[in-house]
Amino acid sequence: MENILQGDALTLGTCYYPEHWPQDLWRSDLERMKENGIEVVRIAEFAWSKVEPREGEFTFAFFDEFLELVEEMDMKVIFCTPTATPPAWLTHKYPEVLNASMEGVKYRHGARRHYNYNSPKYIELTQIIVEKFASHYASHPNIIGWQIDNELNCELNNFYSESDTIAFREFLREKYKDLEGLNKAWGTDFWNQMYTDWEEVYVPQKTVSDSTNPHRVLDYYRFISHSARKYAKLQADIIRKYIKAEDFVTTNGMFGHLDNHQMTKESLDFYTYDSYPNFGYSLDMYDPSPQALRDRWWSHNLAETRSISSRFGIMEQQSGPNGWNTRMEAPAPRPGQLTLWTMQSIAHGADFISYFRWRTCTMGTEIYWHGILDYSDRDNRRLSEVKDLREKLDHITEIAGAKYQAQVGVIKDYDNVWDGELDAWHKRVEKASQQALFEATQLSHTPMDYLYLQEDTTLDDLVPYKVLFYPHATILTRERIALLEAYVEQGGKLVFGCRTGYKDMTGQCVMEKLPGLARKMTGADVYEYTFIAPDSETVTIEWDGDMLEANVFLDLVEPMDDSAKQEGTIVTGDYPGAGALVSKDFGQGKAYYYGTAFTRKSAESFMKKLGVLSPLADLVTAPPTCEIAVRKKDETPYIFILNFKKENARVTFKQAVVNLYTGETLQGDVELEGYGTLVVKNT
């Protein structure tokens, strides 16, 4: 068990809160967990006051008693630092640790994550409490790993305290050295925003009509990420002084304005995600339309997680209906969905699944965020499903350590992610294309990875993919384009969408012919562009017999010289006869410039023409209601079929395969029950 996520086991855990329950329940809870296949508990992420009830007064008795019982029962523990919820004595005595709204109103005690990362006092108190936790508990034989904080940047991913302004100035001083550099990067000649003293620089503030300097905001998002990463590393460095050699350090979540990739490299052994597919059924927060793919959209989030950490776990896996007393109403998981959602996580690469939570809390904001057990503590359908799932996992243990397989990748980078958040033009096309590409890959059974370009990304990271999509690379750099050119030169196929290459790293528009730095590789010349007007005739593009519908935006594009080829021509709309798709042979590969946002159909057309659509069709076919995923280990592919609908699905195996759940051989048509799952390998 100490080797969790080392490729030798599929492990189940649960989030447990001994501070919420009478001590006479602890033993029976742990016994029932073990009886039902749960081997690990996560504890203490909100329990600062159990160790430091008053400033400077430390007592370890509470968790010492719990850990004595854990050791007796041979249960394993992931211990957490408690910094997500500072105690009342702390925020009362030191209000400067509190985060604030853009208007400067402090967020007070009574919820969670109300602190800011840059308060010198909170950093000091964090160092003390983490040191106390780690120095006292880390040597315990049943602790196998540590979680830093809880869900960094959850609740709020913008910070407006006085400490943040001071830290922001220092961040900018280090980046730009002087105000001349800052003013140039932020384009402060526009609207007379020139800064003449560092004391004039603040984190973004409320302005007229919510207008703001986009270059300032882009740097502000980078600053937030820097602050969160620095805070995570502060804790990781302390913990590593005390933990056993085989124990790990991780954190959980996946939230905005945070470079999770860099944080993982700097501070973690691996990343863990909190997977709540039931949000897809929430009545007040999420798109209820079938196009949103509901719970299946969490495969997108799991693919994002996999891009952060190829070896990852799920620290909080949906086990019951979710909701707070103030928001987030959702139904209970239907029979089979708890298993489906667990196998969804495993299909995408997770070898550790920890359910949130063991028992539903009877107090506080999360009284409707149900766990495996309800308030009554009786055995129920969900507990039975966990036990049945444990038996399934025992039959597929050989999958542990297998890597997700994909021939198609979608490129991202944090600069464009954050620019797409603050720039309405960028956001519109990005949202359309990201949803279209995900739906196209999911519904055509084409496994897909996300690939984030970072400073240490190399050609070796790109070459496993036959086709890469970079939907809207608004911000391009010479380093990134050189890497992409090397990928295409060695035989890769790269597809850009509209609005590529028109900004630099500051977010300012470049005075170059578009698509800027991508012109050489694509051979494309964008000579005019426009949103597609709401009252416009549908814009269709003919490409080698396929009729594609333009989406949201239109770049009119033509080959810039004879080295490129016009592949697609506009047939209907305001610009008939104009070009919309250009390609260029570049080295051994090929680059495409597609002058619009993607639709599901256009994404499928690209994948079909480029030879990567439905790569498993010779082995297995299934209706679009099913997801097909592949993990591979020692040259053996393991194929997951997940049915996201309540109706049975007909799956056809064109070759003989082994059902790993049962050991039986399958070939031909197989009925997969509603919300059912299958894991197979070749005979």
Image (spheres, rainbow, N blue to C red):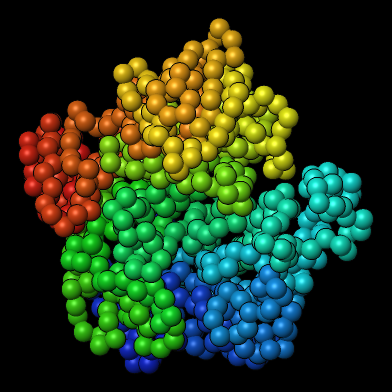
Q: Position of residue 443 (x, y in %)?
A: 28, 41
The quarter of the picture where the N terminus appears is bottom left
Which residue is found at the position 18% from the left and 48% from the top? Answer: 678
Task: Let me know if residue 447 appears in the view.
Answer: no
> Which image quarter: residue 67?
bottom left
Pick the residue in front: 33 or 75. 33
Q: Nearer the viewer, residue 321 or 41?
A: 321
Q: Quick check: 166 above or below 33?
A: above
Percent coordinates x, y for residue 668 in the rendering? 7, 36
Q: Residue furthest top?
A: 562
Residue 660, horizontal then vertical, whole percent: 17, 47
What is the quadrant of the C terminus in the image?
Answer: top left
Residue 478 seen in the current view: yes
The single residue placed furthest to the right in the displayed view is 196
Percent x, y for residue 464? 44, 29
Q: Nearer the viewer, residue 375 or 420?
A: 420
Left or right of residue 194, residue 74 in this image: left
Q: Residue at horizontal 81%, vertical 51%?
A: 191
Q: Residue at x 55, y 15 (%)?
A: 559
Picture quadrant of residue 598: top left
Above or below, 167 against 44 in this view is above
Count of number-bearing discs: 0
Q: Residue at x 22, y 43 (%)?
A: 624
